[in-house]
């Protein structure tokens, strides 16, 4: 039977009752099979009573491995709950392969910050990572994981809710922990990563001809600021209206490839410019030889990008619906971006043929671009599980 996914969502005010309802709904999706892996996303009253939520999920599912985190909002069942009390439960069973949970912590030493508890991802099919954004060095860790296990997809989201005492609850197996990051390591389980950065490429492709760190000095042999100004001037009126809300730059991380597509651009904001030097600074490291292109984000381009990205994953499955998916969407999306409720949840349900999905609104989304994992913003990252 391969892989089976079950998901549940509850907005019951009582944390225990809500967690039981969502977990039992997820259990029904497993059709009596064991829950090898469970993910729990807690919002509202659940953030202040994570122990009750965790106990109820264990009672209903008896999971082999469990992780979870506090969330500003959750999604599941094709709908989104952006505020208030809610809990989403995702459960998976796998005939082949193995899933293990982990809790990684950042330990300060006189010389540096050491991270303990990270699994060895060599040979893994994928990993899901849920960090505390204030107590875990996510960016450096993702770089280290990419170096140690190149090509292994790491997908997830930064926890987005704090309890009244300021702590960010993280769940791992039967414990509520503070600080660090929790996650799942999948081995022998196929996972298709999907990253929708919600931005449309506009203007020409330009080659970085001089750069250091995050500062671009030249594009196509011109001062970088001059080249970008010319590119903006050549945009259509509609494209200029799109960039009025904020200009973004897409960087092809793997510029050594003979060809690249829309999803190969790592989209980052421009964070500064020096008119005297003609340089611009972008929120990532750039190197000479990289290809860049202007990007703009609006609701239409975000909708189109998400549906196209999901459609490609469906094509990779020969048109068949997957067993299910885990969804990590930015807490800046939702009604604020699309002007309507349930956009991302409904799009995932529609494009993946009604396959069960659950997830949360994250304070930063983790997913691969060019084969390397990054933290994104205003993005939807999705772990798709073939049947």
Image: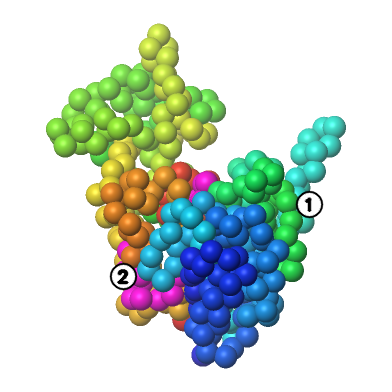
Work out whether residue 61 can be spotted: yes
Q: Residue furthest right?
A: 110
- Residue 160 in percent (x, y) is at 55, 49
Circle count: 2
Work out whether residue 264 can be spotted: no
- Name the mark on residue 51: none
Q: Residues within 10 Å of mark 1 (few under 14, many from 20)?
A: few
- Residue 61 in percent (x, y) is at 63, 80
Q: Which residue is mark 2?
A: 350
Q: Nearer the viewer, residue 380 or 334?
A: 334
Q: Residue furthest top?
A: 276
- The Cα–Cα distance between marks 1 and 2, rounded to whole angstroms, is 40 Å
Q: Residue furthest front?
A: 13
Q: Which residue is mark 1?
A: 116
Tell me the colour scheme of the image: rainbow
Q: Nearer the viewer, residue 275 or 218?
A: 275
Q: Which residue is found at the position 48% from the left and 65% from the top?
A: 11
Q: Is residue 187 magenta?
A: no
Q: Secondary structure at mark 2?
A: helix
> Nearer the viewer's eye, disc 1 or disc 2?
2
Q: Which residue is found at the position 73% from the left and 51% from the top?
A: 178
Dividing the picture into quadrants, the one containing residue 62 is: bottom right
Q: Which residue is found at the position 33% from the left and 46% from the top?
A: 337
Q: Nearer the viewer, residue 54 or 13?
A: 13
Does 266 sit above or below residue 355? above
Does 386 sit above or below residue 329? below
Q: Which residue is found at the position 41% from the left and 41% from the top?
A: 267
Magenta stretch bounds: 347-366
Q: Secondary structure at mark 1?
A: strand
**Residue 193 left/right relative to 168:** left
């Amino acid at each position: 039977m391969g892989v089976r996914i079950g998901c549940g969502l509850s907005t019951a005010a009582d944390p225990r009752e809500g967690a039981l309802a969502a977990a039992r709904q997820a259990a029904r999706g497993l059709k009596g099979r064991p829950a090898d892996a469970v993910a729990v996303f807690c919002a509202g009253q659940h953030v202040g009573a994570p122990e009750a939520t965790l106990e109820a999920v264990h009672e209903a599912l008896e999971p082999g491995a469990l992780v979870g985190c506090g969330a500003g909002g959750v999604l599941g069942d094709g709908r989104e709950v952006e505020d208030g009390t809610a809990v989403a439960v995702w459960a998976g069973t796998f005939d082949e392969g193995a899933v293990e949970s982990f809790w990684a912590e950042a330990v300060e030493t006189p010389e540096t910050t050491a991270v303990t508890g990270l699994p060895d991802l060599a040979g893994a099919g994928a990993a899901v990572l849920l960090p505390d954004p204030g107590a875990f060095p996510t960016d450096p860790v993702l770089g280290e994981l990419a170096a140690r296990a190149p090509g292994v997809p790491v997908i997830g989201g930064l926890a987005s809710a704090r309890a009244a005492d300021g702590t960010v609850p993280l769940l791992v197996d039967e414990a509520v922990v503070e600080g660090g990051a929790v996650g799942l390591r999948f081995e022998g389980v196929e996972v298709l990563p999907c990253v929708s950065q919600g931005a449309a490429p506009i203007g020409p492709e330009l080659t970085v001809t001089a750069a250091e760190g995050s500062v671009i000095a030249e594009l196509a042999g011109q001062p970088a600021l001059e080249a970008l100004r010319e590119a903006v001037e050549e945009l259509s009126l509609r494209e200029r209206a799109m960039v009025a809300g904020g200009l973004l730059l897409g960087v092809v991380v793997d510029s050594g490839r003979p060809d690249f597509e829309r999803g190969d651009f790592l989209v980052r904001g421009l964070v500064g410019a020096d008119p005297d030097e003609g340089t611009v600074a972008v929120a990532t490291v750039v190197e000479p030889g990289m290809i860049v292109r202007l990007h703009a984000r609006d609701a239409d381009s975000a909708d189109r990008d998400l549906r196209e990205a999901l459609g490609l994953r469906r094509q990779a499955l020969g048109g068949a619906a997957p067993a299910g998916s885990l969804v990590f969407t930015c807490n800046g999306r939702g009604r604020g971006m699309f002007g309507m409720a349930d956009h991302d949840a409904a799009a995932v349900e529609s494009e993946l043929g009604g396959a069960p999905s659950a997830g949360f609104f994250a304070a930063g989304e983790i997913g691969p671009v060019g084969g390397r994992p990054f933290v994104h913003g205003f993005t939807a990252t999705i772990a798709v599980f073939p049947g």
